[in-house]
Amino acid sequence: MKKIGFLSFGHWANHPAYKTRTASDTLLQSIDLAVAAEEIGVDGAYFRVHHFAAQLASPFPLLSAIGAKTSKIEIGTGVIDMRYENPMYMVEDASAADLISEGRLQLGISRGSPEQVIEGWRYFGYEPTAGENDADMGRRKAMEFLQRLDGVGFAQPNPNPMFPNPPGLLRLEPYSKGLRERIWWGAASNATAVWAAENAMHLQSSTLKFDESGKPFHVQQAEQIRLYKEAWRKAGHPGEPRVSVSRSIFALVNDQDRLYFGQEANRVDQIGMIEPGRNAIFGRSYAAEPDKLIKELAEDEAIQEADTLLLTIPNTLGVDYNVHVLSSILEHVAPGLGWR
């Protein structure tokens, strides 16, 4: 049994083939898709966060709206770039979204990836401290965010407040009990996966990671997951860690599917560069008739290691088609793999 969710990049553009021509289209359709996905039995609705781009950038209003219109589906991000965030404000926003959804928030954070503009976080008013680089800054902010989620008071109260204060130091409000245990870290390397485990965060591993051995993508990703699980065990954290992997998977069950994704059938892993001087490996897409798809996915080691699979969806093709994409996996593929 695996949890199966979708991951939307939230693209929009004034393109004749797109169902999402504007930001409004993307936001409203994201809500509609999450509602429909819950109805067909999808376990999670997750959204990418990118700044300075025609993509979703402000996750908490969207997650709150989805939380208010659904009752079971997990809602989350994959991932929020902590270089751009105020950890204190983010605690308030995340806690509010979690309370609205009654504890269904699964929040993915990370130090971020290359963005649309050079050092975009500077436009948000942030810069590394002396001796830090931007990755260090992202991780430092993540640790502050985690610390303030614990609900322990830290702020000195005003002796003459506008409203009465409880005794002792004050915490941020609202406080959502249990949210700290539902924070995930998006890791592109083995080392950061281990760091996430040591700091009691669940692991999100996407369709790319740094190439650290030259092995196929799914093998490297499976090794990363095993290192993460071992680090969690060594740290002695209570409970079991969760791990998600993202995949582009399309079951070709009609002519429309074959028109859109038939060309993906023979794709292979790709090597590229997302940071100067460091190669990354990008995992292949899967597109085939259901029987063939089941055989191919059964050989993906990383999927076998994970408990949660996030299906990247073509959000620009509209709600109805994406419901079809998700339904096809649930009906024709998941049972054959023991996921349902």
Image: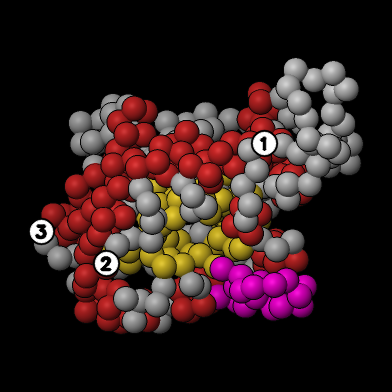
Query: Does the magenta segment cover residue 238?
Result: yes
Q: Which mark is residue 51?
A: none
- Cα separation, mark 2 vs mark 3, equals 16 Å
Q: Which residue is mark 3?
A: 255
Q: Is residue 71 above or below residue 283?
A: above
Q: Which residue is mark 1?
A: 173
Is residue 2 shown left or right of residue 306?
left
Q: Are marks 1 and 2 in contact (CB under 8 Å)?
A: no
x and y percent of residue 1 in the render?
Answer: 40, 77
Q: Is residue 243 above or below residue 153?
A: below
Amino acid tagged 1 = Glu
x and y percent of residue 91 in the render?
Answer: 66, 40
Q: In front: mark 2 or mark 3?
A: 2
Seen from the viewer's position, the closer of residues 90 and 273 is 90
Q: In front: mark 1 or mark 3?
A: 1
* Region in magenta: 222-242
Amino acid tagged 2 = Ile
Q: Which residue is mark 2?
A: 329
Q: Secondary structure at mark 1?
A: loop
Q: Is residue 101 above or below residue 56?
A: below
Q: How is the image coloured?
A: secondary structure
Is residue 150 shown left or right of residue 255?
right
Q: Quadrant of residue 184?
A: bottom right
Amino acid tagged 3 = Asp
User: In this view of the protein, can residue 330 be seen by the observer?
Assistant: yes
Residue at x 57% of width, y 52% of height: 108
- Residue farthest to the left? 255
